Amino acid sequence: MALWILIFDVQRILFSIHNWSKFEGVSIPEWLGAFIFSFRLDLATASFLCVIPLLFLVAHILYPQKWFRYLFYGSLYLEILLCVLVHAGEINAYPEWNHKLTTRVFTHLLNPDEVVRTANGSMTFWFIVYAILEFLIAYKAAKWILDSAFKFEQNRTSKWYYHYPIGAGAYGVSLLFFIMLGRGGFQQIPINIDSAYYSKNYVTNDLSVNSFYFFTKSFLLYTRSEIGALFKKIPEKESKETLKDFFNYPLEHDRYFLKNSRPNIVFVVLESWTANAISSLTGEKGATPYFDAMTKQGLLFTNIYASAGTSEIGNSTIFSGYPALPEISISMQPDKHRKIPCFNQDLKKWGYSSHYLFSGDLKYGNIGSYFTDHGFDELADENDFPSGLPKGKLNYYDEDLYDLFLDKINNTEEPFLHCAFTGSTHSPYDFPQEGTPNWDGSESDFMSSMFYADKCLNDFIEKCKKETWYKNTIFIFVADHGHASELVKNPNLGAYFHIPLLVYGEPLKEEYRGQHIPTIGSQGDIVRTLLYQMGGDYKRYKWSKDLMNPNCPQFALHTINRGYGWISDKGNFSFNIDANYIHDNTYSKDQFKSEEKRCQSFMSLVYEEYKNL
């Protein structure tokens, strides 16, 4: 037990050293609190980790054969290795993800080349360094403790009828003791990660929560078949009554922003573009001067939120209007995502062709399969770029993406749906950095990448203006998900998911140019909004809202790491399922009760449909 507690605290020290910039504003006493408030959860984790090695240790004491001793050491060092790998991965992923290592890693591990390319040389180096360092420290500590412990073998009695019952009884008592410690005591509800929460700062709470416990629980929940058990189930009739404003609001309105109902449509999905780095959305200094200028000629939706924190979920939400649910990525489940609608299928009825271009690998998150299954006419990724182009580890640079994108559009007959998914604003941010300003803070590399991406976007639009098809083409600029910025770093806050949505182009009516629409919504509301403008069958996107409809209820559901969040015109909250902990709540007491029920009702209805797909 002492060995494991030592290992966990050493890992906290190494994590703090590597990620010290994340502890900005945290006092030393508050930081030290993690080593105190973590003890119960550390003890519980250590208890479970002791069970199997202790079994082999007792067997060796009772029957001193070498292979029992080998099994003891083998099981112990295997557990240490697993613990070390989880923590070394967490140390390196935390600067980018801003949360502890979870089953999200399995999405990436399905494509190992994606992991290698996302991680820069520094991340790979430090992962190896921390893994080796932590394992050596644990090995030396274990050897010192165990070499002393094994000396008692010399005093073992040789009478089997004496030491067998004593040994078996000792193991039985120890097992019960470990089970008691593992559940945190004799209280009715077992211990959970909330026992380690002690601060209002999410980073110190993350430091306090045992990494191996957190990852293991995340894995167990990841493999569960009934994801719906993660949140409250509400009867359908009750849910619909709670959300009657969503199901019964008047659908017809006359707020049409398109000059004609059949423009060409160009989507640009902007990797990680957070609204918190865009001046036109925050009023603060940002990294996108060209985008800010474009908002003066376009229709800007100022209160749009990403549905989740990963690209594959963002894409499926944008094009299928399907909400994200905790621990569910529908693009990874072809048997289900094939049964939901997709925007290109509506356009195909009107003669539109559909095209999607990504500057990286479409295998990531099963994005390629999702668009293939929904009948896109053309999919292209890094394998279709001209040879000889410079390239980052993860993607081709945005400037080259837009050149290829423009070439593909120029060789397409109208009407068309063309989509591009950028990549230079994704770590490791190895874009051409000449001319980018210097930024302060821990997100300086990301902010520089936003500045670069913004310039590339502007160059693309200026080139598009010279083409004949431009006059009948509407552009939709939207992010796949948010990202940490100097304004908002906590990934558990609703503001973290705030993203841009801009409609731009000649088909936009003059009276809507430069307008800001404050309706609260999500990526999933784009498709219904566009189809209403085009006279399509928008009603088949049942979870989507028409953002131009003045009667539209204002809310957005999003997921967080191991939980969910809800944003409405009255405020917002986010909730961690494992910890039974509210991260972010701006509602009054009465408002919270009402909005929480609305959120849970919405999730309950979506999940029941998802389960039956």
Image (cartoon, grey):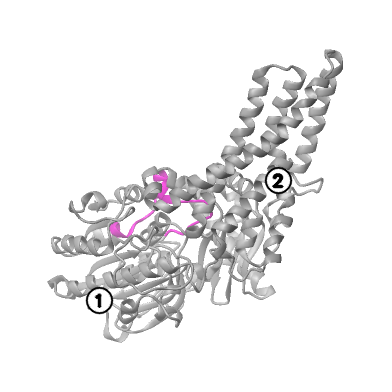
Going by the picture, which residue comes out furthest to the bottom?
Answer: 511
Q: Could you tell me if residue 119 is visible in this image? A: no
Q: Could you tell me if residue 114 is visible in this image? A: yes
Count numbered badges in the picture.
2
In screen coordinates, is 396 left or right of 247? left
- Residue pictured at 27% horizontal, 69% vertical: 456
The location of residue 308, given as percent across then percent down, is 47, 60
Task: Say what amino acid the circle numbered 2 marks.
Answer: Ile
Task: Say what amino acid the circle numbered 1 marks.
Answer: Gly
Q: Tell which circle, 1 or 2, labels the residue nearer the N-terminal end.
A: 2
In screen coordinates, is 93 left or right of 592? left
- Residue pictured at 33% horizontal, 80% vertical: 295
102 vs 420, nearest the viewer: 102
The location of residue 79, given as percent across then percent down, is 61, 36
Q: Give the residue pinned by disc 2.
A: 5
158 vs 327, nearest the viewer: 158
For mark 2, does the 10 Å Cα neighbourhood hold few (<14), some (14 to 19), or many (20 or more) residues? some
Q: The N terminus appears in which quarter of the rendering?
A: top right
Q: Give the residue pinned by disc 1.
A: 505
- Residue pictured at 59% horizontal, 40% vertical: 136
- Magenta stretch? 322-346
For mark 1, does the 10 Å Cα neighbourhood hold few (<14), some (14 to 19), or many (20 or more) residues? many
Is 340 magenta? The answer is yes
Residue mark closest to the camera, 1 vs 2: 2
Marker disc for residue 208 = none
Is 129 magenta? The answer is no
Secondary structure under the numbered disc 2 in the rendered image: helix
The location of residue 266, given as percent across then percent down, is 26, 66
* Quadrant housing residue 598: bottom right
In screen coordinates, is 560 left or right of 252? right
